[in-house]
Image: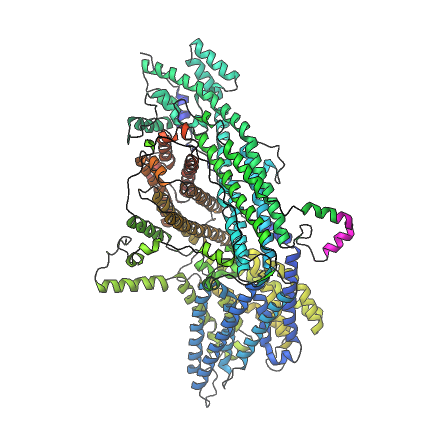
């Protein structure tokens, strides 16, 4: 019996202290830092294009006209000092919106201002009825009580409606202004009069009319043209991303790319860019659907093109993931080979005394494969990463699993040896004895001979199929370029004059000459009878015919596929899907050009429900400081987990299980191509409606009690059992009503807003201070607090900073304008127009600094208006006193909102961020369990059921994606919170959000691939791997929920029961040995789909472990982990 090789103490210490590594490297990439102030200022300057400049000019003209009306008699005399509100109304309407969205703001604002004025007049009238004419006191208790009650109640419901309906934001701000100024001013009115309130209302309506007329008359903007420009930019960017990823995967730097090969974007950057571009395109689509226009393209065409573009998200992100996984594999192999070269060369030569062995090692090194690569290769990378190869050296059960075996000994051997090698190959070899060791050594050497060829085979396969891949990629690029030419023609766009002034065309023609201008125009011409999608279709056919060339070389000698085969098939699927969607889009544009030949009046195409309640803004705008009240509802719980669980329960109850068909009993198999691309078609409005709104047959089979919230199959409450008696049901329904409609963040926010209004308006209802309060116009403190109050300490602190800065800048600017203009109307108007220009740019494109630009503009208008026309005692007030009063009012309002935000306890942005990330983690887990587990259920599926599940999956994924975007905004705001208890770990949360985006993309990839696999094929895979699959699913969900609970409760993370990467590896190793994955079945399309699912699932395990490790850095490890020195 041979002696076991002994290890030196140094070697033992080195192995004991070796860091734990993931089997696959994460693809999230390095952390993308938040933008600095310098970068934001640079981006603000770069955003100044001709369209933005036109919007600035139009908005500035409107506010200047409104200010001029106040300064010119007799308009200024009739409107009184309330005429200032015309300028304020213009400044509150954000000028970046299209005329359709401006019309919405004007419509909602007008209605809300009329209602607010009517409410204020009613309060004044009732107060006049109880006023005692014989009492000389102005602030009589009964009068003040009525006015205060109307003010508080009105502000409460006004803020509640403002939070619920996004379109009511502008109207709520101005309606609150009417209410605050009108009701508090009525305290000193001894007789009933509605004139001040009506003056305020008319001034605001005039401001609305000015801004709307200006955007309709002066350079009116065509929303369809704006949409097409954004669509063209998106197509060019997506095509550049696709070409980069394809070239990087194939290791080819000879192609001319829009971005150099060395600066290939990471997966995280591509995820962010894709989300940004698609979100912007959806916003422009909603603009088009809400407006009346005169175009060739109809709103239904815009909707269908948007739907086609959104389908590019999955294959584009899939290409990036494939490229990142392949790159990680190569890098990891190079690192391992370099680190272990010297040590393993010595070890192998010492142990190999046989001359034949030495000859083998020398031959291997001559072929470019060092002995270190043979002895200690990265087990989870490329073909050599397959634990099945290692099993061949130490087990005799290396044959594929029998199709009728449920739990064979070889499966146990695979799982055992897989974990056996996790601790290291050398420590495992010590447990072998003499004769057994010698036999295994010989088999190990035979296995290494096979392994020397896998990478060479892989590189040779890539070199063979590379032209086919590049042909398909190039065909996609050509099809997109031709589609862009047709889109430009449909909207009469010339790329030479895009984002240029209207006169630039004549200047350019004069500069280069007419002949050259016509010669350049020929570059944008095309044959209208040539369909650009036909060459792409042929390239797709060629790709399908050649995609399997050489792939049989990526199997082991026992017929088991290597992981690199799965990765290559994943890349093929994403490239083919991308080409398929580009083909559909290009053919759709071609059909539109043939069909849409006449300009027509296009009516809005949107339902009333979407018109009233659909959000159309940027997620960062919805929860940004300029609309901070919306933060309360930005990431509100939508009960995703309950909805998904109910869906799974319903489907499982209405469908009866049936045994899976035995695919192995079929006599013959044919090789399928991937899906045939669907050609796009132009539809009329009625055809589009029928195409989108298909009949949902599933709901006809669902009984009404299962749609109820009190579902016995879905009811789980650890506090109380299922209500059975009528009394219990009544109180349960009452509890649910109060929980859903009263005990909410929206109601709490509205209550706090009403409280702060009552406190700040209190001096206006006291006899000792009522005269002073109205003289210094203290109502503006109420207006500032009512409009700009936010639900979080972070948003209020940040808002205090931005609004204070804006007020100071506006005050200084107003004094300069007044002194330079010497109080003359002409000087004030001209100087105001000039000085306001830069602050309109900040207001339009300042992102988080929008409030600064707006407050600067509002402050200038108010100070100049009051300094010119305000005469409390028949005498003018100094501009410096007006400025001081304005600054004190603003500071009082924003300070009051900051103070009240800490009651009953401070809700800091970083705490809310942590809780919402925890909620998002739980919902991602619910998304994974309710859909991917449902796809593996032993139930037959109808086409309608699959489509319904996919729609629900997309909608839930969209909600989670918007939540992550909102959490990024909270992270931005948390940077400005004072670090009283310690520095905020910004990098950790940035990394978590980046990983969450990658996890969501991977789950979407998995659903996309698994949804294409038929039920019978899935069951053929699941039936022999059910135990391992359940362990994998449970390990994924435990890790996700563990991270969620750790964040919400600040609890340390305990050790894993089983690591997600290990559970996934055990399942993969067993699944690879199934007969259905043998080389003769590689032509089936399901083989490719499952390969994509498998690689995404393996990468998901890595990202989940990285996520838990990052969360552990925040909350700390459990004490057991410390004692056992457990590495997460």
Give the left or right position of residue 389, taking residue 535 as reference.
left
Query: Magenta includes 516?
Result: yes
Q: Farthest residue to the top: give it.
A: 355
Looking at the rendered image, the quarter that the N terminus falls into is: top left
Query: Magenta includes 692?
Result: no
Q: Foreground residue, 306 or 141?
A: 306
Q: Is residue 1046 visible?
A: no
The answer to whether residue 471 is above or below residue 714 is above
Q: Farthest residue to the bottom: give it.
A: 134
The answer to whether residue 513 is above or below residue 900 is above
Looking at the rendered image, the quarter that the C terminus falls into is: top left
Magenta residues, start to end: 502-517
Q: Quadrant of residue 737?
A: bottom left
The answer to whether residue 270 is above or below residue 633 is above
Q: How is the image coloured?
A: rainbow
Identity of the residue drawn at 53% across and 69% down: 107
Q: Foreground residue, 297 or 105?
A: 297
Residue 496 percent location from the top left of the image: 69, 50
Residue 173 percent location from the top left of the image: 51, 68
Q: Is residue 684 visible?
A: yes
Give the left or right position of residue 228, taking residue 1105 as reference.
right
Residue 959 percent location from the top left of the image: 44, 52
* Secondary structure predominantly adopted by residues drawn in magenta: helix
The answer to whether residue 1081 is above or below residue 439 is below
Q: Foreground residue, 599 or 508?
A: 599
Q: Could you tell me how many numbered marks the image carries?
A: 0
Residue 334 percent location from the top left of the image: 50, 27
Q: Quadrant of residue 16?
A: top left
Q: Foreground residue, 918 or 370?
A: 370
Give the left or right position of residue 510, taking residue 819 as reference.
right
């Amino acid at each position: 019996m041979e002696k076991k090789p002994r290890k030196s103490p140094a070697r033992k210490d080195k192995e004991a202290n070796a860091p734990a590594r993931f089997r696959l490297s994460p693809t999230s990439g390095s952390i993308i830092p938040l933008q600095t102030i310098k970068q934001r200022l640079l981006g603000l300057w770069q955003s100044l294009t001709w369209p933005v400049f036109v919007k600035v000019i139009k908005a500035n003209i409107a506010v200047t006209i409104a200010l001029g009306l106040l300064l010119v008699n007799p308009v200024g005399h009739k409107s009184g000092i309330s005429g200032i509100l015309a300028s304020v109304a213009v400044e509150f309407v954000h000028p970046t919106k299209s005329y359709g969205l401006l019309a919405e703001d004007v419509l909602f604002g007008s209605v809300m201002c009329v209602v607010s004025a009517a409410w204020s007049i009613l309060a004044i009238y009732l107060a006049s009825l109880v006023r005692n004419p014989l009492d000389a006191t102005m602030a009589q208790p009964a009068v003040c009580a009525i006015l205060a009650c109307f003010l508080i109640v009105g502000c409460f419901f006004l803020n509640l409606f403002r939070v619920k309906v996004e379109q009511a934001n502008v109207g709520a701000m101005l309606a609150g202004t009417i209410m605050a100024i009108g009701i508090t001013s009525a305290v000193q009115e001894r007789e009933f009069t509605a004139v001040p309130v009506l003056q305020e209302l008319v001034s605001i309506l005039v401001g609305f009319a000015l801004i709307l007329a200006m955007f309709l008359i002066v350079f009116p903007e065509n929303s369809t043209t704006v949409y097409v420009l954004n669509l063209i930019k998106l197509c060019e960017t997506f095509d550049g991303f696709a070409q980069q990823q394809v070239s990087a995967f194939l290791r080819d730097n000879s192609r001319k790319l829009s971005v150099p090969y060395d600066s290939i974007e990471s997966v995280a950057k591509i995820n962010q860019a894709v989300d940004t571009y698609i979100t912007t395109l959806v916003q422009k689509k909603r603009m088009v659907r809400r407006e009346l226009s005169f175009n060739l393209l109809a709103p239904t065409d815009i909707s269908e093109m948007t739907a086609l573009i959104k389908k590019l998200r999955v294959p584009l992100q899939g290409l990036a993931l494939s490229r990142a996984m392949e790159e990680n594999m190569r890098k990891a192999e190079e690192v391992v080979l370099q680190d272990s070269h010297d040590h393993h060369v010595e070890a192998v030569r010492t142990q190999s005394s046989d001359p034949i062995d030495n000859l083998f090692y020398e031959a291997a090194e001559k072929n470019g494969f060092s002995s270190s690569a043979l002895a200690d290769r990265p087990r989870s990378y490329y073909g050599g990463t397959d634990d099945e190869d290692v099993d061949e050296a130490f087990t005799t059960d290396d044959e594929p699993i029998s199709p009728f075996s449920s739990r064979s000994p070889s499966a146990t051997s695979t799982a055992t040896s897989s974990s056996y090698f996790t601790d290291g190959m050398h420590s495992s070899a010590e447990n072998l004895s003499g004769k057994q060791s010698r036999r295994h050594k010989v088999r190990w050497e035979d296995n290494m001979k096979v392994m020397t060829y896998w990478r060479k085979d892989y590189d040779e396969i890539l070199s063979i199929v590379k032209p086919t891949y590049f042909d398909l990629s190039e065909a996609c690029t050509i099809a997109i370029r031709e589609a862009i030419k047709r889109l430009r023609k449909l909207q009469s766009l010339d790329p030479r004059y895009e984002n240029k002034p209207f006169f630039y065309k004549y200047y350019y023609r004069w500069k280069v000459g007419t002949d050259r201008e016509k010669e350049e125009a020929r570059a944008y011409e095309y044959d209208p009878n040539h369909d650009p999608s036909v060459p792409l279709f042929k390239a797709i056919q060629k790709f399908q015919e050649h995609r399997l060339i050489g792939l049989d070389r990526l199997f082991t000698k026992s017929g088991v596929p290597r992981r690199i085969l799965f990765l290559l098939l994943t890349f093929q699927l994403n490239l083919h899907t991308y080409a398929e969607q580009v083909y559909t889009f290009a053919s759709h544009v071609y059909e539109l050009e043939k069909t849409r030949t006449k300009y027509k009046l296009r009516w809005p195409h949107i339902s009333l429900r979407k018109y009233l309640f659909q959000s159309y803004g940027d997620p960062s705008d919805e929860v940004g400081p300029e609309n901070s009240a919306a933060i309360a509802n930005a990431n509100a719980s939508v009960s995703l987990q309950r909805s998904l669980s109910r869906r799974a329960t319903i489907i499982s109850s209405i469908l009866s299980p049936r045994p899976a068909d035995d695919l192995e009993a079929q006599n013959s198999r044919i090789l399928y191509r991937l899906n045939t691309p669907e050609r796009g078609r132009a539809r009329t409005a009625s055809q589009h409606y029928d195409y989108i709104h298909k009949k949902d047959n599933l709901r006809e089979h669902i009984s009404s009690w299962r749609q109820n919230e009190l579902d016995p199959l879905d009811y789980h409450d650890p506090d109380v059992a299922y209500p059975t008696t009528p009394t219990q049901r009544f109180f349960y329904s009452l509890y649910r009503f109060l929980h859903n409609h009263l005990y909410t963040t929206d109601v709490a926010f509205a209550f706090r807003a009403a409280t702060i209004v009552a406190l700040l308006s209190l001096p206006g209802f006291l006899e000792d201070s009522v005269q002073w309060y109205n003289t210094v116009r203290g109502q503006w403190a109420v207006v500032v607090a009512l409009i700009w109050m936010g639900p979080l300490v972070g948003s209020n602190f940040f808002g205090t900073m931005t609004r204070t800065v804006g007020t100071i800048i506006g005050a200084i600017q107003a004094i300069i304008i007044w002194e330079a203009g010497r109080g003359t109307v002409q000087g004030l108007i001209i100087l105001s127009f000039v000085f306001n220009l830069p602050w309109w740019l900040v207001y339009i494109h300042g992102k988080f600094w929008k409030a600064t630009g707006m407050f600067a503009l509002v402050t200038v208008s108010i100070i100049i208006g009051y300094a010119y026309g305000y005469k409390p005692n028949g005498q003018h007030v100094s501009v410096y006193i007006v400025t001081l009063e304005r600054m004190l009012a603003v500071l009082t309002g924003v300070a009051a909102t900051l103070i009240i935000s800490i009651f009953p306890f401070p809700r800091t942005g970083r705490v809310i961020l942590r809780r919402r990330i925890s909620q998002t983690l739980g919902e991602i887990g619910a998304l994974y369990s309710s859909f991917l587990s449902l796809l593996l259920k032993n139930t037959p599926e109808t086409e309608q059921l699959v489509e319904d599940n996919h729609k629900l999956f997309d909608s839930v994924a969209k909600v989670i994606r918007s939540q992550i975007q909102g959490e990024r905004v909270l992270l931005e705001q948390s940077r400005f919170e004072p670090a009283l208890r310690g520095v905020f770990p910004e990098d950790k949360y940035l990394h978590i959000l980046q990983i969450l985006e990658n996890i969501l993309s991977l789950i979407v990839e998995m659903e996309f691939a698994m949804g294409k696999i038929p039920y019978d094929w899935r069951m053929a895979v699941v039936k022999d791997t059910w135990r391992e699959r359940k362990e994998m699913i449970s390990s994924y969900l435990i890790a996700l929920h563990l991270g969620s609970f750790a964040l919400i409760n600040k609890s340390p993370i305990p050790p894993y029961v089983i690591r997600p990467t290990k559970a996934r590896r055990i399942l993969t190793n067993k699944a690879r040995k199934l007969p259905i994955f043998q080389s003769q079945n590689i032509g089936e399309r399901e083989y490719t789909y499952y390969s994509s699912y498998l690689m995404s699932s393996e990468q998901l395990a890595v990202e989940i472990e990285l996520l838990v490790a990052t969360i552990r850095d925040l909350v700390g490890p459990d004490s057991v982990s410390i004692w056992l020195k457990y590495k997460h």
